Image: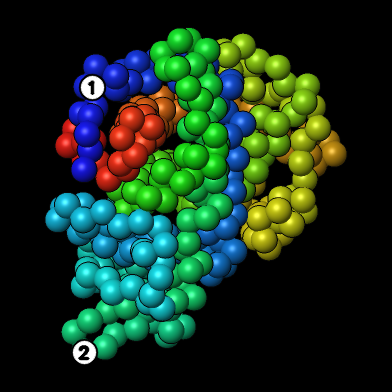
Amino acid sequence: MMKTLPSISDQIDEKLINQIIKNNFALLAPSFFTLTSNWFIRAYEHFKDIDKFVIIIYLINKDLIFFRKNGVKIDYETFYRDKSIEIDKINISDISKDLNIPKESTRRKLLDLEKGGVIKKSGKKIFIIRDAFYAARATDTLNEISTILHEFNKILKKEKLVNEVYSVNEIIASMKENFSFCWYQFNKFWFSYMVRWRNELKDLEILCIGMVVVINAVKNKEFNPKKNLRSFQKELMGSDTRGVNAMSISEITGIPRPTVVRKLKYLIDKKFLQIDKKNLITFNAKESAFITTTKMVDQNMLDLSNFIFRVFNQIKIINENKKKDNNEDFVPGYLR
């Protein structure tokens, strides 16, 4: 049992978190864009179809919602222990609406998953089999999220809002202990992120391809922007002096080169990207594309702030109370 009650005043306020992100975005950007780029690359790798992977994650997330509603806390090892996971009944209309995938496409992809043995039915029960379930295992994503939280924690320490910086491994361990809660919160953020961009681009493979170009610019050693979000966005546009070609993007993502070329053309025509005489692609959103990108980033950072508010505060409370009374089982009500 917990011997010491956590102090409500010690939590980091959500509005403050958003302001800290805006003021220090350049420090968080490399880890944030690494997560977004790598997630889509991994998603495509599993089924050669990002939407199929997203549907699997959506179905698994129904279990996380069930656990949360019933006050059940599941750790990482327990969650991935079995050979399959039982999921709730499949409602094609709900999946289509929630993920913004056309209904017939949703139906077709579910049938493909069933024919491929990814989804199996046994009487009235529905299961996702081990291989697909393990494909959705959160190992790499956990590490990338924990890196973002670690970088955020360092900013808090520098601004004297906390006394301690948790290591990436400590954050991973805390999230694994409270996996069902933390992963529900991540999925809530991530589904909003994906649906928002799908509404704009109509296709997550387009986003995957675009993110490779973005991360190429963000990680350019010559790029040294001001810390705040607005300056970062403006300075990032056209800053990449190297560029990346369609073949390299194809090799990085696993998406066939003809598909990459076609989807790059869409992003260039929409003025999100630009291409030079050597066929090198760079991120340089202009006109309406820049306005759209700015609005998207603002919304995404609000959602990220909510995720950090709920998960980082929990990690902070758990680790502080481990030191006080060696008890790690508390999940405060305001974070649920």
Give the vertical position of 145 relative to 127 (above or below): above
Tell me where residue 276 sits by quadrant: top right
Q: Nearer the viewer, mark 1 or mark 2?
A: 1
Residue 240 shows which numbered tag? none
Mark 1 / mark 2, whichever is N-terminal: 1
Quadrant including the N terminus: top left
Q: For mark 2, does the 10 Å Cα neighbourhood hold few (<14), some (14 to 19), or many (20 or more) residues?
A: few
Depth order, front residue of 21/93: 21
Q: Amino acid at mark 1?
A: Ser
**Label 1: how many Cα within 10 Å (few below 14, some 14–19, many 20+):** few
Determine which quarter of the picture holds residue 257: bottom right
Residue 51, relative to residue 143: is it above or below? below
Q: Determine if residue 82 is in view.
A: yes
Left or right relative to 93: residue 202: right
Residue 14 location (% of width, % of height):
30, 22
- The answer to whether 159 is drawn above or below residue 32 in the figure is above
Residue positioned 64% across, 22% down in the render: 236
Q: Amino acid at mark 2?
A: Gly
The one of 132 and 98 positioned closer to us in this rendering: 132
Q: Name the residue located 28 percent from the left edge and 74 percent from the top edge.
A: 86
Residue underneath mark 2: 123
Above or below, 207 against 136 in this view is: above
The residue that label 1 is drawn on is 7
Distance, label 1 to label 2, CA atoms, is 49 Å
Looking at the rendered structure, the secondary structure element under dot 2 is loop
Q: Helix, strand or loop at disc 1?
A: loop
* Percent position of residue 198, x then y: 42, 47
- CB of mark 1 within 8 Å of CB of mark 2? no
